[in-house]
Image (cartoon, rainbow, N blue to C red):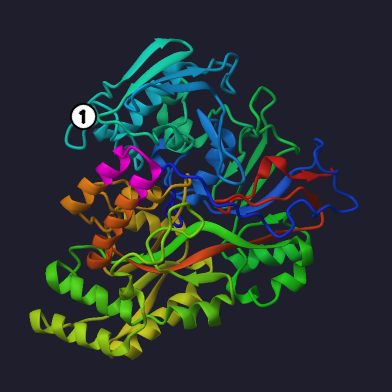
Amino acid sequence: MAGVAASILAGSLVLAACSSSSPDDKASGDAASGGGTSTGVITANGSEPQNPLIPTNTNEVGGGKILDLIFAGLVYYDADGAVHNEVADSIETEDNQTYTIKLKEGWKFTDGTPVTSKSFVDAWNQGALLSNGHLSSYFFEPIEGYSDSEDSELTGLKVVDDQTFTVKLKQPEADFPLRLGYSAFFPLPQAAFDDAAAFGENPIGNGPYKLGGDGAWQHNVQIELVPNADYTGDRKAQNGGVTIKFYDTQDAAYNDLLAGNLDVLDAVPDSAFGTFADELGDRAVNQPAAIFQSFTIAQELPHFAGEEGKLRRAAISHSINRKEITDTIFQGTRTPASDFTSPVIDGWSDKVPGSDVLEFDESKAKELWAEADKISPWDGKFTLAYNSDGGHQAWVDATVNSIKNTLGIDAEGQPYPTFKELRTDVTDRKMTGAFRSGWQADYPGLGNFLGPLYGTGAGSNDGDYSSAEVDDLLKQAAAAGSIDESNALYQKVQEILFKDLPAIPLWYSNVTGGSADTVSNVKFGWNSVPIYEEITKAE
């Protein structure tokens, strides 16, 4: 998922286990004991969603974090990334191309209307329709009838009865069921189609939480979620609700945690990397997560198109001393990247041919830049945009200084006040320079880091990269007969990406966070998000 985030997601692999240091040992004297339901409301950090809360039009972590709490999909992912049925009773296929999905009885939305097969089919069709322009429409591309050139119904979706529907894909894809926990595949009630604008401001879901009534979403301040008493799944809330506070800076959120004004934090600011383990003790978390960080340079930006662009991208990549930055700025909470995915995903490799372009090499960088200058002499300033509310200034400054000192060009960071403002300009294609990017996985698979970001026309392909060879390999990987075959094809995709560099890989992120002594049962999942529904707190 972009901003990662962001949001947003294709793969079928088993996540390598990565438990936190002591997630079950964070009990306090005044917090409820493990396992029991408590009545206290959990406070957590977050960011103002980019868009109204429509599942198929949300592909960034601020909105995605909320949607995952107020909606329930066909399946969900546990803390280790394992897949469990939620609304689905069964997902069956004989050929990996036509799937029969049966729903459990008794599910309903918080407005009292039932969750039926039509709730899924209508929601998917709305998200896939070209004229709606939803950011996650790409995820419906495998389904028969999908079109990215004209409005077209998903003809591969058929309602059999209220509890059963079928999905026919354009080709066999064995990992299709594993994608179905992503928010793009959530169901919607009729109210979402009657008045989409009103629904986006006050979404009606079927998950473990719901909005806490009128005024629950105070834009740029917080959103209040309360338990959904009608939720019948396995993720039942063990607390009295979750209030997600929107912070302008990570430092402010961390200071609130230390002061007892925040219960759970999932992003420690760089200013506290050297101290948070001592300050939080056994309540500190520093564990691997499925997060990849990069920056993107749009394909048609002046001096970055065609062969000149390939040379300049490679030169810039060789100009960045990733190890020095991760050691100095991040102090053991980041690892220099050696591919475009994440080491916690099964099938990851640090030996993809072409990955040497990520090595710091001053002479090679200067040589490549000089070759590009022969095509068209460089002029202007290299800028790298970032959001100030995300704790990015230190690494951006270090990165542009590394580029400046190596290549001898003018380079500087370009701050945006908020993540929402940055993402809006990225989505509207208003960026005039490079911009920070990356991915927080939505489900545990290598393809989740590749198709949504680098497939032609994909919803999170913010640099508008297009390669027929990459598209063909992504399609082959999705249709592969085994996970190993699929992974081998995804590695071939990366070989091409290392030549084209549609994004410049930087590093992999650990989730660095923690909790106050007001809460217990705090656990962070494979994708760095706290398992909010399991956290307990005394009133």
Identify the residue at horizontal 21%, vertical 29% (top origin).
151
Relative height, residue 373 to residue 391 (above, below):
below
How far across and how far down the image is residue 534, in percent? 71, 41
Residue in view at x 65 percent, y 41 percent? 224
> 370 above or below 282?
below
Is residue 370 shown to the viewer in this render? yes
Where the C terminus falls, by quadrant?
A: top right
Q: Nearer the viewer, residue 423 or 455?
A: 455
- Of all residues, the one furthest to the right in this rendering is 29
The front one of 82 and 47 is 82
Q: Residues within 10 Å of mark 1 (few under 14, many from 20)?
A: some
Query: Is 407 a magenta residue?
Result: no
Left or right of residue 47, residue 533 in this image: right
Exactly how many numbered labels are in the figure?
Answer: 1
Query: Could you tell me what secondary structure mostly forms the magenta stretch?
Result: helix
Label 1 SS: loop
Q: Residue furthest top?
A: 161
Q: Which residues are magenta?
A: 474-487
Please determine whether, in this image, residue 298 is positioned above or below residue 31. below
Report if residue 460 is visible in the image: no
- Residue type (three-letter) at the residue carrying disc 1: Asp
Tell me which corner region of the image, top left, top right, bottom left or bottom right, holds residue 35: top right
Residue 395: x, y in percent? 47, 76
Tell me what residue is drawn at x 40 percent, y 48 percent: 448
Residue on which the image places disc 1? 151
Q: Which corner quadrant of the image does residue 110 belong to? A: top right
Q: Position of residue 23 (x, y in %)?
A: 73, 53
